[in-house]
Image: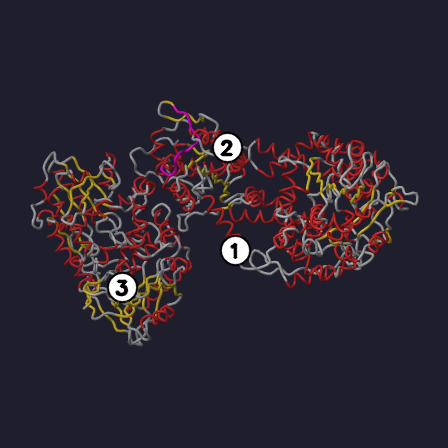
């Protein structure tokens, strides 16, 4: 196996020009797939790079990172008996899909705890830094941290979810030079040392965003999670062009000056989402390289899924744990660490692309950061497509201004009643009134954010915060402004129209509809994602 | 001539709130400018004057006078500068009375007013073909005699001459309105003769019939109170309402008993009538009424006017004018809606219909002519018939053709906006139609029983309610066949010799202004251009497609429910806010701390018990809860409370109806108080606290940190729920008329009925049909699509939690 050239000599990303011999191309389509033939001679496909080789001994690499941090002292030297130590970690929105055990967070936290124990630290709290996301369940915490850590700390109540609405659990750290409030989880803020364990799956993650957002609440987050900021972030995956990150970095300054001492740990993983073998492996192969077995597997899988009820499909996909491998781990100073992380991230994700396109197509998979073990509702479809996938660029957007975006997803009118209660009301009440980000922000955001019932559910049940669906919509604000039309192929027509998009039943229809906007015979670019890729557009 | 005769006279009218009476009042007021009217009306709660204003003068019959007054301020007898109301006040003298009681129920003032009458027209009658025998006897049989007696007394009490010149002691002329059908069901000519002069009349003693009708009432009341009957009625009430609680069941039982007695009285009327050769109790009591009038009239000069079936006006006050939904209209409406597939009748038979203005003209002409005098100059009772059958017959088959062709051109639209095509009647015999309807009804009854036994909700339950509606319609259709079938098969020809004698005695002006000649009617024009257009308006049939009436209504009701004026919104929990129940929450909590083997055992046990629990629940909610909650004995409070919070996510929110929760929040946003009243345990619903201002739930007593399984008070279910609501409203100074209540089951009826704005949510069959009938807002709320589907309500085990392996609750 080790001799598999895919493992030892992975090929970089690729832009393929479609000609007549190009086979039909894979589109993710929720809990299913479509194969679509793209028009020859004017279409191109951007393929992600093959998975970079993982670190051969992850535990040793982690140990080295902790002992030799970047622009900081070795971790053991920061740990003293009697100190207050808080370990914050990314929640289950990362990575996507969830990774096979042991999770990187578990590997890191076990080592950190061993060092802390050796140093005689006994006041340790572990906090899931979930900002306004839903609380993680016991099972999910166990998956991230491992049973050993969970059983040792949970009974004393030392492992818990961050609660941004706990009136006694949040502190104000001050204002940024732009008068942005900075708030932080009280326990984290009052600790002698705050260790933040990151899982950086895309270039948006990490840096000051970890603490400034992950451990903050509505009053701090609203300064960058808003329409104006998102319109200034081109893209929000490109930290230096992202107003979202600039604001977080300003808040970081306040944290640096008035908050706890921070020891940042960041990690990157490779593109090994579906494995080198097994039924899913075909999904990260290029179509013209599918062999007979791949074809058979794919057809069987597709037919099987098409026949299954949604709940069964959902159970299967949610059960898939990705065999990601660690490609880098670095610890120490927040900004210095993050720069290294970005390099590793880009190394895996960036694919150079020349010029923009009239029509951008992609298939949306079954998962986005906000529906792990849940339902991908129409609002999340919008966010994954126009927020995440659209923003997977550096330089210029893949699609030209006024161009058309065609996405493929079943977009069912379905919601998880426990995880997304405010989404349901957002969809029924807000979107039926307006889909304009600025208008709905002005008219409804505050009401949803301060709603007592949503706050109750966020704190005590497993619900995303009342304001969260707004953020989903803001995430796509820049794309909404940029695009001439959005078409969803194979989606629930009512749901798609409620989103303000146009439904099409086939890719052919969608391309016809697109030509109304961009003219006949437009250029087409297909983003073959996942596994993740980021277009470096020149 | 007529005008001259009647001007300057005061005319007393009974039955002026009825169809014929209203037309008569209008016609007299408008065409006899100098007459005055005394209207004898039942005063009701508001008094005689108010009844005249509301129930007579507001009728659209008077639109014509109003518009003529606008054109010519002194027309229709108005004085210079006098308004319509002013004129009515001057010319109309209401007196409170009732022809159904001896002495007409008049007070002194009323008697004094009646003494000033020159002429009396008695048109009060119980025209309903299915009225109770004794009611019909009181009004139709005894009424005319009572009026005559009243006029005799008035003559004696009269101190000075009347406007028209009647001297003290001189009796006013009484024109009594009867019906052609007093001739009974027979074939051939029916001349204008007194009933007892007919060779076909079976002369019974009308006094004995009166006594017997009273006896029949006593017997029916008696029979309705036997234990067997009362038990049966109570069972019927329970079937209709389910577990609605004792007071509601009792109320319904009494309603059913009264209905049963009424049915008995209708039946005795119909059977007595047919035993004597009359189509129904109406014709029968009218016939005996004529008989008793002639026998007891004394010195009162009497004329009898007998119309056949009175229908909408030919021309006066307006073409097509009609008041109320009368005999033929419900049948025609049912036909137009496609409900009456068949109706009995002989196509070549005559359907004797007469426009109401012709009848009014005849009455006025008879009144103007005065009593018929014999050669000795003594007034003799005389009869004038006004009918169409002999002079200008409308064949039943032709009429059906006219109706069908009109509705084919102007179809009624169903709720899906499709035109309804009217059926083709084949004129079968009455027996065959009745049998067909009976069979259909039996089938529906059986279907309904099956549906009733199924635990249906929401849309499926609506289907059940639809079935019930069909059943009602069939029942009504059956009723029409039973009631009116006799009329379509009646082949008597009413002779009009006296009528034509009177008609020919009129001068040209009178003939123009008081047309009573049936030959003036062109039947096709009458049916197509006059009767049906007016009838479909009256019946509010949907004649144009497009308007989404159902949704409009729902939207309107929703707006009312969410109006600023509402004060309180009260919600039930199970099947209103969430699709779950106490058994589910118990089993969730109980299994949470069991290991796998025990969970299986528990599940098997609960499933085994389920049918019995369901039965107990259906019989009496609070008994069920009391029995069931004992299972929480010895359950540790602290752990249960913690588990309840988890259960909110795993069970309550998962099975919640997002639209319901949104509605609660909308009410709060409107500033309404929100209240949850549920039989569920407080610990189960406590996590829902932030949703409501207050929660009333079942409280369990506890000691030493564990629950003891006993409730501290009656659980708020059924009528107890109503009491809780009433107490709550009083405590907070809220008006129940401004309250909205949401519930799913007929056991919530007391609560739903108590509030001004009841809403049936996902209603089970019984409530669905009740809500539909009463026009309540009906909401279908469902779980969020995409919600995890759990077959059994089993708590996810707190896997390796530190407090595991303890005894389950």
Do discs 1 and 2 share a chain? yes
Secondary structure character of the magenta stretch overall: strand
Report if the CB atoms under discs 1 and 2 are less than 8 Å apart.
no
Quadrant containing the C terminus of chain A in the rendered view:
bottom left
* Front residue (pair B612, A200): A200
Image disc number at residue A482: 3
Image disc number at residue B548: 1
Judging from the image, mark 2 belongs to the subunit labelled B
- Residue B272 magenta: no
Relative height, residue B9 to residue B352 (above, below): above
Do discs 3 and 1 share a chain? no
Tell me, yes or no, if residue B305 can be seen here. Answer: yes
- Describe the element under mark 3 as helix, strand or loop: helix
Q: Residues within 10 Å of mark 3 (few under 14, many from 20)?
A: some
Q: Residue furthest front?
A: B80
For disc 2, the marked residue is: B722
Judging from the image, mark 3 belongs to the subunit labelled A
**Which percent across, then down, holds residue B477?**
69, 50
- The stretch of residues the image draws in magenta is B690-702
């Amino acid at each position: 196996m080790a001799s598999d050239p895919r493992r030892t000599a992975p090929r970089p990303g690729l832009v393929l020009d479609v000609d007549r011999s190009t086979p039909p191309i894979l589109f993710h389509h929720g809990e299913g797939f479509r194969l679509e033939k793209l028009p020859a001679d004017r279409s191109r496909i951007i393929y992600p790079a093959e998975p970079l080789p993982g670190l051969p001994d992850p535990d040793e690499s982690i140990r080295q990172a902790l002992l030799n941090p970047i622009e900081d002292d070795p971790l053991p030297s920061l740990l003293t008996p009697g100190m207050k130590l808080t370990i914050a970690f990314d929640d289950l929105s990362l990575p996507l899909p969830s990774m096979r055990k042991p999770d990187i967070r578990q590997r890191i936290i076990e080592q950190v705890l061993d060092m802390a124990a050796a140093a005689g630290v006994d006041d340790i709290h572990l906090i899931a830094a979930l900002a306004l996301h839903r609380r993680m369940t016991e099972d999910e915490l166990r998956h991230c941290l491992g049973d050993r850590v969970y059983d040792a700390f949970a009974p004393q109540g030392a492992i818990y979810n961050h609660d941004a609405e706990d009136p006694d659990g949040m502190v104000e750290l001050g204002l940024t030079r732009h008068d942005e409030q900075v708030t932080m989880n009280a326990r984290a803020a009052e600790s002698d040392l705050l260790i933040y364990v990151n899982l950086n799956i895309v270039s948006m993650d990490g840096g000051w965003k970890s603490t400034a957002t992950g451990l903050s609440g509505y009053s701090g987050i609203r300064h960058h999670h808003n329409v104006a900021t998102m319109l200034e972030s081109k893209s929000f995956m490109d930290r230096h062009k992202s107003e979202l990150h600039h604001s977080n970095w300003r808040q970081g300054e306040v944290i640096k000056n008035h908050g706890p001492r921070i020891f940042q740990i960041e990690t990157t993983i490779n593109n090994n989402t579906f494995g080198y073998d097994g039924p899913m492996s075909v999904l990260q192969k290029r179509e013209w390289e599918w062999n007979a077995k791949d074809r058979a597997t794919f057809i069987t899988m597709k037919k099987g899924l098409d026949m299954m009820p949604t709940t069964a499909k959902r159970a299967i996909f949610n059960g898939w744990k990705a065999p990601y491998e660690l490609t880098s781990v670095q610890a120490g100073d927040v900004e210095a660490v993050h720069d290294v992380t970005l390099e590793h991230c880009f190394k895996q994700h960036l694919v150079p692309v020349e010029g923009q396109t009239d029509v951008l197509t992609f298939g949306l998979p079954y998962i986005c950061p906000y529906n792990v073990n849940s339902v991908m509702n129409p609002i999340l479809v919008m966010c994954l497509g126009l927020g995440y996938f659209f923003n997977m660029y550096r330089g210029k957007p893949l699609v030209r201004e006024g161009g058309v975006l065609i996405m493929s997803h079943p977009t069912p009118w379905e919601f998880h009643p426990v995880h997304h209660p405010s989404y349901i009301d957002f969809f029924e009440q807000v979107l039926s009134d307006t889909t304009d980000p600025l208008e709905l922000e002005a008219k409804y955001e505050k009401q949803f954010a301060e709603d007592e019932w949503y706050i109750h559910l966020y704190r005590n049940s497993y619900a995303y915060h009342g304001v969260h669906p707004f953020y989903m919509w803001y995430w796509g604000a820049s794309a909404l402004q940029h695009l001439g039309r959005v078409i969803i192929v194979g989606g629930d027509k009512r749901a798609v129209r409620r989103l303000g998009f146009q439904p099409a039943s086939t890719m052919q229809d969608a391309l016809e509809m697109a030509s109304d906007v961009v003219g006949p015979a437009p250029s087409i670019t297909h983003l073959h994602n996942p596994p993740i890729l980021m277009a470096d557009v020149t | 001539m007529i005008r001259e005769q009647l001007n300057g006279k005061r005319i007393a009218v009974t039955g002026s709130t009825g169809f014929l009476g209203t037309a008569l009042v209008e016609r007299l007021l408008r065409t006899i400018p100098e007459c005055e009217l005394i209207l004898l009306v039942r005063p009701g709660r508001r008094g005689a004057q108010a009844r005249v204003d509301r129930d007579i003068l507001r009728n659209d019959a008077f639109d014509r006078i109003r518009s003529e007054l606008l054109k010519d301020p002194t027309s229709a007898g108005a004085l210079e500068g006098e308004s319509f109301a002013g004129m009515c006040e001057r010319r109309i003298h209401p007196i409170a009375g009732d022809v159904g009681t001896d002495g007409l129920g008049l007070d002194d003032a009323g008697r004094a007013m009646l003494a000033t009458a020159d002429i009396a027209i008695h048109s009060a009658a119980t025209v309903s073909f299915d009225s109770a025998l004794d009611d019909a006897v009181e009004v139709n049989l005894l009424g005319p005699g009572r009026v005559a007696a009243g006029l005799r007394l008035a003559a004696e009490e009269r101190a000075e001459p009347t406007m028209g010149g009647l001297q003290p002691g001189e009796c006013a002329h009484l024109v009594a309105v009867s019906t052609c059908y007093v001739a009974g069901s027979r074939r051939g000519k029916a001349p204008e003769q007194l009933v007892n002069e007919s060779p076909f009349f079976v002369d019974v003693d009308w006094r004995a019939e009166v006594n017997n009708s009273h006896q029949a009432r006593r017997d029916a009341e008696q029979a309705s109170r036997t234990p067997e009957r009362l038990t049966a009625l109570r069972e019927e009430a329970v079937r209709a309402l389910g577990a609605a609680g004792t007071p509601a069941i009792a109320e319904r039982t009494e309603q059913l008993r009264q209905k049963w007695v009424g049915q008995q009285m209708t039946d005795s009327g119909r059977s007595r009538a047919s035993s004597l050769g009359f189509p129904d109790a109406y014709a029968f009591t009218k016939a005996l009424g004529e008989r008793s009038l002639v026998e007891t009239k004394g010195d009162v000069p009497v004329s009898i006017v007998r119309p056949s079936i009175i229908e909408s006006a030919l021309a006066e006050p307006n073409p097509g004018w009609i008041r109320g939904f009368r005999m033929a209209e419900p049948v025609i409406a049912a036909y137009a809606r496609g409900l009456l597939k068949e109706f009995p009748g002989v196509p070549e038979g005559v359907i004797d219909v007469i426009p109401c203005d012709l009848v009014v003209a005849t009455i006025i002409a008879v009144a103007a002519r005065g009593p018929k005098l014999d050669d000795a100059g003594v007034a003799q009772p005389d009869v004038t018939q006004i009918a169409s059958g002999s002079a200008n017959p409308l064949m039943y088959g032709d009429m059906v053709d006219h109706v069908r062709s009109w509705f084919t051109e102007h179809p009624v639209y169903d709720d899906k906006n499709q035109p309804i095509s009217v059926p083709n009647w084949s004129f079968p015999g009455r027996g065959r139609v009745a049998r067909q309807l009976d069979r259909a009804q039996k089938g529906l009854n059986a279907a309904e029983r099956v549906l009733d036994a199924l635990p249906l909700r929401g849309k499926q339950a609506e289907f059940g309610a639809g079935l019930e509606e069909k059943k009602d319609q069939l029942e009504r259709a059956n009723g029409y066949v039973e009631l009116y079938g006799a009329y379509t098969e009646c082949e008597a020809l009413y002779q009009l010799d006296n009528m034509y004698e009177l008609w020919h005695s009129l001068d040209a002006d009178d003939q123009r202004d008081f047309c009573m000649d049936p030959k003036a009617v062109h039947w096709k024009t009458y049916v197509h251009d006059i009767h049906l257009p007016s009838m479909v308006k009256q019946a509010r049939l949907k004649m144009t497609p497009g308007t989404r009436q159902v949704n409009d209504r729902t939207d309107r009701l929703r707006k009312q429910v969410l109006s600023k004026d509402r004060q309180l919104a009260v919600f039930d929990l199970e099947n209103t806010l969430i699709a779950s129940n106490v058994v589910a929450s118990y089993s969730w909590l109980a299994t949470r701390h069991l290991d796998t083997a025990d969970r299986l055992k528990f599940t098997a046990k609960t499933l085994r018990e389920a049918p019995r629990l369901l039965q107990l629940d259906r019989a009496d909610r609070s008994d069920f809860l009391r029995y069931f909650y004992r299972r929480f004995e010895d359950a540790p409070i602290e752990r249960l409370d913690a588990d309840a919070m988890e259960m909110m996510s795993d069970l309550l929110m998962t099975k919640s109806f997002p639209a319901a929760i949104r509605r609660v929040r909308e009410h709060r946003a409107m500033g309404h108080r929100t209240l949850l009243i549920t039989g569920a345990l407080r610990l189960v619903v406590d996590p829902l606290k932030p949703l409501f201002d207050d929660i009333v739930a079942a409280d369990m007593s506890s000691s030493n940190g564990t629950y003891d399984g006993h409730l501290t008070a009656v659980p708020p279910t059924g009528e107890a729920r109503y009491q809780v609501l009433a107490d709550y409203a009083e405590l907070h100074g809220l008006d129940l008329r401004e309250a909205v209540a949401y519930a799913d089951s007929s056991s919530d009826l007391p609560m739903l009925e108590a509030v001004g704005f009841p809403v049936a949510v996902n209603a089970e069959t019984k409530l669905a049909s009740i809500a539909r009938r009463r026009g309540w807002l009906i909401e279908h709320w469902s779980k969020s699509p995409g919600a995890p589907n759990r077959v059994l309500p089993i708590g996810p085990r707190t896997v390796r939690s530190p407090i595991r392996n303890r005894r389950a609750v």
